[in-house]
Image (spheres, rainbow, N blue to C red):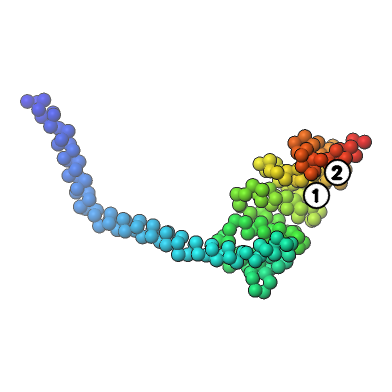
Amino acid sequence: MSKQIKSQDPEQAVGRTLSKAEQFLEKHKNTLLYALIAVVAVISVYFGYQRLYKVPLQDEARGQMFMAEQYFRVDSFALALNGDGNAYGFLQIRDEYGSHAGKILPFYIGCCQLHLGQYEEAIASLQSYKGTDEIVAARALACIGDAYAELGNLDEACSWFLKAANFRDNQYAARYLKKAATIREAQGNTAAALKLYEQIKLNYSQTAEGREVDKFIARLTN
């Protein structure tokens, strides 16, 4: 008899659990309903924002970028940065669209400022570049080095050129190493310059810098 009672216990336990769940649902059904409505509302707002606001704004920003990028490609940096009176420049696009204009925008702005002699502004803009393109990221680091060099801060410039050269072993590393070597040579630090030139010779002999590096090494060793 006791065995029969024990065999019924699991079913009774399940029944009690279901009963408690039903009681909980009955007691809190309004709260749960409101919570479900809130979740649905949040999801609807999110997708509505993406489809009805963010994507159209990004498309509009890309359209505005077109003319500024054309000026940038032909080295018309003032027009690219400030616009031509009809088309927006990069600064206006940043003010109007912010991050919707894309991660490349701070790089464009910084390069323009660098070429226009706005070195402090260029450093700030280039440091704010957060894009994932490795070539552009390395170039941004090198441009920061150029800006510091123009400001006369050669040690800082050399540091940024080396950061650019060591950034994921990018294809322009030899160019950045040469910039650093030139600074060290100008500072009279022959040993450091020679080490950088030899690094170019060892690792980047097939580049334009690598093909001419022997004359720099010869000059320093002789």
Q: Is residue 220 visible?
A: no
Q: Residue at x 77, y 34 (%)?
A: 202
Residue 211, percent from left and from top:
81, 40
Above or below, 115 against 13 in this view is: below
Residue carrying label 1? 154
Name above or below for residue 174 compared with residue 56. Answer: above
Q: Residue furthest left?
A: 1
Residue where numbered disc 2 is placed = 185
Q: Count neighbours of disc 2 (C-alpha within 10 A) and say few if under 14, some if 14 to 19, many if 20 or more.
A: some
Left or right side of 183 for 6:
left
- Tag count: 2
Residue 43 or residue 136, whichever sits in front: 136
Of mark 2 and mark 1, the one earlier in the sequence is 1
Is any atom of residue 218 visible in this view?
yes
Q: Secondary structure at mark 2?
A: helix
Is 217 displayed left or right of 165 in the figure?
A: right
Q: Is residue 9 above or below residue 31?
A: above
Residue 71, picture quadrant: bottom right
Image-quadrant location for residue 124: bottom right
